Image (cartoon, rainbow, N blue to C red):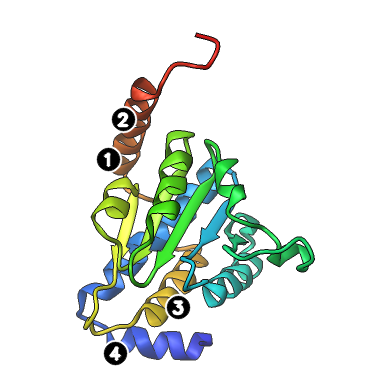
Amino acid sequence: MDAVRVALLREVLAGTEWLGATRRFAASLRGSVVSYGGGLLLVGTTEYEPWHLAAHLVDEAAWSGTPELAPTLVRHDARASDPAHLSVGPGRLAAARRGETLLVVSPHGPGDPLLERVHDARRAGATVLALGAGGDELTAMAHESLTVPDGAELDLDSVQHLVSAAAGESSLPAPRRHRRFRDRLSRLADELTAPPPARW
């Protein structure tokens, strides 16, 4: 979807909650990658890989001069023989740390193995964002989420276009401060409830 189509879609959606919701989510995405300067990991489910979103974020990163927006696409069936940009497997999520952002896109909710990996990444300090069907566990785990329920006016593909376009805009408002405080408080709770290091 090019800029003209995104503009037309925004015009059609004027007065709905979608424009504000996608801009807020995009602000959280851009704010997390710019503020922390870490990498953006983009992962879907075993049935759905967000190729389109990855491509659009790479474009927006180039056009906006924000290289942090260019994601690393984490693929469930990646093989070592794949090209470098397609060979990152789910093991990369285990290495996610503070300063990195994990964007999970799931049209029908992630399975338990992915939820466990996301939970581990969050405990290690990564910022977790969820886009799609969500689900109680993923939504509760995410620092920010945007749910696209079945039967909504927009499908997940259109929402991804709106989010990626908004994330590349320099006029995007800064993420709300109370979210950042909540994130810090949440991270502190994660650290306090983590098991002691192995040497104990």
Q: How far from the left and from the top, in percent, is residue 129?
A: 40, 54
Which residue is the site of mark 1? 178
In terms of depth relative to the viewer, which is nearer, 126 or 69?
126
Compared with 194, 87 (above or below) is below
Mark 3–mark 4 distance (CA, rounded to whole Å): 14 Å
Which residue is the site of mark 4? 12
CA neighbours of label 4 inside 10 A, class few (<14), some (14 to 19), many (20+): few
Q: How far from the left and from the top, in percent, is residue 133?
A: 30, 68
Label 3: which secondary element: helix
CA neighbours of label 2 inside 10 A, class few (<14), some (14 to 19), many (20+): few
155 displayed left or right of 157: left
Compared with 124, 144 (above or below) is below
Q: Earlier in the sequence, mark 2 or mark 1?
A: 1
Which residue is the site of mark 2? 185
Mark 4–mark 2 distance (CA, rounded to whole Å): 39 Å
Q: Earlier in the sequence, mark 4 or mark 2?
A: 4
Q: Earlier in the sequence, mark 4 or mark 1?
A: 4
Measuring 42% from the left and 86% from the top, which residue is drawn there?
7
